[in-house]
Amino acid sequence: MQTLYTLSTMENEVKPGEPQKLLQQHFDQTRSLLIYLTWFLTEVIRYAETDAHQKASKHLPTTEDLNVNTKIAGNELLWKMLGDPALKEQFAIEKPQLTLQQVQSGDTDLVRKIYLLLTETPEYKTYTARGSRDKAEEKKIIEFILNDLLLANEIFTSHIEENFPNWDDDGEMVVQLLVGYIHKPGSYNFKEMMSADKQDFAKNLLAAVVEKGEHLQSLIVPKLKNWDPERIALLDMVMMKMGVAEFLYFETIPPKVTINEYIDLAKDYSTAQSGQFVNGILDNIHKELVQDGKMQKVDYKKV
């Protein structure tokens, strides 16, 4: 949807291969967000070592300065994550530390600020008070940092929004991916942000709408009644084309699933009336296709 909307707003003629290139860029942006969140989380945890070193290096360190508890920096789950070759490769490619260095000066010590917030929490004090290590506790403290000190922190989420425009669209999915990775470090292929089946579906749907856009629009326009097609919200038209493309060319997707999916997308991304509008148009087109025996679910390239 994002790719098709971008293509619809382009003034120049779309070049061959450009739609797929834009789609890949969206996939890459999602990966960059995941890598940055993962890196930031590990930096907060590791900051205990930096804090201990800085305090011990004071001209006249106090007893407290010389006895900073660095247990969390040795978190076993943390080091499983940092030891993952796939994650290390992505850190080297993405260079997330540069993103933090490039933000406004007031945020350059954001890692330190969040670490200091962590040290004042009962959860952290309970964790560091335990002399032994427990797998459940190791995971619990990392999830606490992620959920309560990062995702629930307006300063942090504002920082993410400023640096990753795709946060609103991809944030929920990326957080789910990160939680899954925390549960099983080393199990994720960061080069593939989704399964091969889902990637193929996205590429095929994109190709169907791009290559058969005029045909799809010819089915939509007669259903607009008194609406001028040029005054329809561009995003609504994009979603309706996607829905009709699924009717015609994707035999495994039930029409009701298609309609419900685009109703939800319209409500989330377009105007207040878009959900009802898209629902009405797609439902009418579906009924007509069934009545005329045109719901054949054939390969779009043959239409």
Image (tube, rainbow, N blue to C red):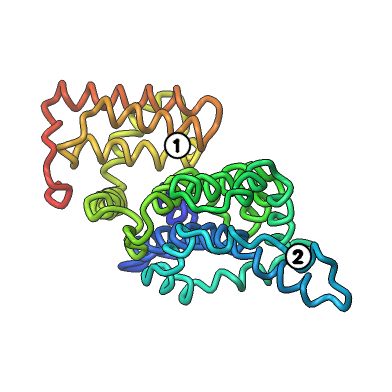
Residue 157 appears in the figure: yes
Q: Nearer the viewer, residue 224 or 302?
A: 302
- Mark 1 = which residue? 236
Residue 17 point in image, percent of width and height: 31, 67
Residue drawn at the location 49% of the way across and 71% of the way down: 94
Q: Nearer the viewer, residue 227 or 293?
A: 293
| Disc on the earlier residue, 1 or 2 | 2
Q: Nearer the viewer, residue 71 or 300?
A: 71
Residue 294 point in image, percent of width and height: 13, 31
Residue drawn at the location 11% of the way across and 42% of the way down: 298
- Mark 2 = which residue? 104
Residue drawn at the location 55% of the way across and 27% of the way down: 272
Residue 11 appears in the figure: no
Extreme-right residue of the structure: 60
Question: The residue under label 1 is which amino acid type?
Answer: Asp
The answer to which image quadrant residue 97 occupies is bottom right
Crowd rating for badge 1 (residues with CA inside 10 Å; few <14, some 14–19, many 20+) = many
Question: How far is the residue under mark 1 from the one under mark 2?
Answer: 37 Å
Residue 217 point in image, percent of width and height: 33, 40
Question: The residue under label 2 is which amino acid type?
Answer: Gln
- The residue tagged with tag 1: helix, strand or loop? helix
Q: Does 127 sit left or right of 247 as displayed?
A: right
